[in-house]
Image (cartoon, rainbow, N blue to C red):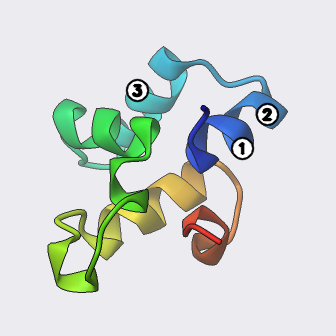
Amino acid sequence: MKSRVQELAERLGMSYDDFVGEMRKRGCSEPTATKIWRGDYEHFEDFTDNDMNLSNLRKAAFVLKAATGTLLPK
């Protein structure tokens, strides 16, 4: 199953390498960018369990030309 980030990237024709590269340009580490790409932040029981920083999700939203809220699970 694709993550929300992967779905949005696919619409833009953006590959994993392109996404990680753009995230790195914005100061995000490669491991964190990979976690965002996989959608690790989408699966948590309590919001405090989510170790993904909102600032990194904002960076991802900017890279994907989307609103931050569109990255959050439905």
Q: Position of residue 3 (x, y in %)?
A: 56, 42
Q: Are marks 2 and 3 in contact (CB under 8 Å)?
A: no
Image-based side of 67 in relation to 58, left or right: right
Dot 2 amino acid type: Leu
Residue drawn at x 41%, y 36% as measured from the top left:
38
- Distance Cα–Cα, label 1 vs label 2: 7 Å
Q: Amino acid at mark 1?
A: Leu
Q: Name the mark nearer the viewer: 2 or 3.
A: 2
At 33% across and 74% down in the image, what residue appears? 54
Residue 8's tag is 1
In what element is the residue under mark 1?
helix
Eye-nearest disc, 1 or 2:
1
| Left or right: residue 71 compared with residue 53 | right
Q: Position of residue 58 (x, y in %)?
A: 46, 68
- Specify the quadrant of the image occupied by residue 57: bottom left
**26 versus 41 height, above or below:** above
**Residue 29: x %, y % from top left:** 18, 39
Q: CA distance from mark 2 to mark 3?
A: 15 Å
Identify the residue position indicated by label 3 in the image: 21
The answer to whether marks 1 and 2 mark residues whose Cβ atoms lie closer than 8 Å is yes
Residue 24 in the image: above or below residue 59? above
Which quadrant is home to the N terminus? top right
How far apart are labels 3 and 1 at the CA level?
16 Å
Mark 3 and mark 1 lie on one chain; the one further toward the N terminus is 1
Q: Where does label 2 land, which residue?
A: 12
- Label 1: how many residues lie within 10 Å, few (<14), some (14-19) or many (20+)? some
Res 6 visible? yes
Is residue 9 placed above or below 65 in the rendered structure?
above
| Residue type, label 3 | Gly
